[in-house]
Image (cartoon, grey):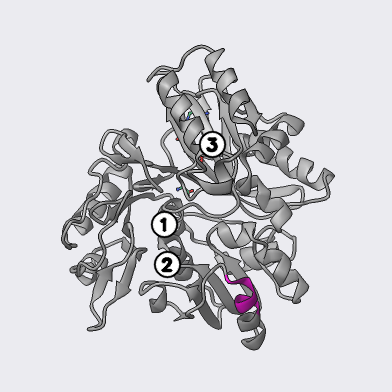
Amino acid sequence: MRVLLLGSGGREHALAQSLARSPLLSALFIAPGNPGTALFGTNIALDANDIPALINFAQDNQIDLVIPGPEAPLVAGIADACAQAGLLCAGPTQAAARLEGSKSFTKEICKAAGIPTASWHYFTELDAALHYIRHKEAPTPQTPLVIKADGLAAGKGVVLAASLAEAESVLQDMMAMGSLGAAGRSLVIEDYLKGEEVSLFAFCAGETATLIGAAQDHKRLNDGDTGPNTGGMGAISPPKGFDKAAQEAALDLTVRPMLREMVRRGTPFRGVIFAGLMLTKTGPFLIEYNVRFGDPEAEALLPRLTSDLLPALYALAQDKLDTTPITFSDQASVCVVMAAQGYPTAPQKGSVIQGIDTASALHDVHIFQAGTTQNASGELVVSGGRVLAVCALGNNVSEAQQRAYTAVKAIHWTGAHWRTDIGARAL
Ligand code: AMP
Ligand code: GLY
């Protein structure tokens, strides 16, 4: 099978590694990829969002399957363009990708399908939104108000406002000043949920879903879950206290009803669903859907996969679930993101990265590259905010954590920083 994988992050490096293990794979191309994906296939200098160029490449190179890593090409309609060109794509149509592309759409689906989610209101006018928050109980640091830009905002679209003044200024910025462009001109304001946050993954085709597994992201920049939100500073898999039975029950509650509703609307979902859940005292609540693997969740999850990923994705692209079960090792996985100085606001690029080979040689350690590139002298240098995902397996979280941090300490570049407590809450 000749495969075209889209994206350039740690998730795509992890996907490339898993795909390369498949005996069915004959050629792997990654657009645009990174120096890590180049270890498993051929990087193609095409933007993951340049749909016409990707379709041309796939047709010229007899690609059997297109696998989109990130959400942007899905929301832009890569699956529809593939279908038109007679190509198979393991991801949802543009209509179904609205589950990630629009927060208000997801809320409507939850309402129609009876899926537990925080109570919410949708606003297209600043005055109405301001009126609503001024007449509601004032937010506090313990019970902030959750403000969500309706559209895609690269991880910057959700603000937990801890006071009325902060909430007002967020609404002004997004709705009046257009700080997030069109994505924030309309928004959802919802109630704050308390609990443990987990990421649940499943393969979906029409009304059917098979559990992949679960992971837990660490979104805040600093230790102890403090500092600004990021794309994710680390992940563990599986999360503590969310076993397979609980994952199956959550799938019944938060994913399968959505799939039935999408079929009923004539826009069936197929692909990987990522349900962001809050495990509250009264059970799981849906925070959001993503229509793809998470990053860094994929880097934590995929090294535990013992079954073949490629036939599973190939079946999805044909609107089917593979008949072979998905299996995982019982090991724990801990993944630490090493970030560039200045991340998440203004990451500094260009520092030379040393020690990856030493770290990769450690037992049960996988180093996935994200914000890396090669400079003119062929050295590996920092090119983005999240630079590496350093992952390790172990017989338990403690062992995996020790291995991951031993690997982190073997890697150096100027300004590198990371959280020192990934997995600590699961110990
Ligand atoms: P989202 O993009 O919808 O996943 O939101 C980003 C992050 O904000 C989530 O991962 C949560 O940590 C947090 N968040 C979103 N909605 C809520 C909510 N209703 N209550 C508490 N935290 C939330
Ligand atoms: N780690 C969260 C995401 O991939 O959206």
Q: Is residue 23 magenta?
A: no
Measuring 42% from the left and 21% from the top, which residue is drawn there? 165
Q: Nearer the viewer, mark 1 or mark 3?
A: 3
Relative to 6, say whether 188 is above or below: above
For the residue labelled by badge 1, is the local secondary structure a helix, a strand or a loop? helix
For the record, the magenta segment spans: 50-55
- Amino acid at circle 1: Glu
The C terminus - image quarter: top left
Classified by dominant secondary structure, the portion drawn in magenta counts as helix
Per the rendering, the mark at residue 176 is 3
- Amino acid at circle 3: Ala
Question: Residue 266: where, in percent of width, then height?
Answer: 83, 50
Is residue 373 visible in this depiction of the protein? yes
Question: Residue 63: where, in percent of width, then height?
Answer: 63, 81
Distance from the alpha carbon under mark 3 to that under mark 2: 39 Å
Distance from the alpha carbon under mark 1 to that under mark 3: 38 Å
Comes first in the chain, label 3 or label 2: 2
Ligand 2 contact, mark 1 (Cβ < 8 Å): no
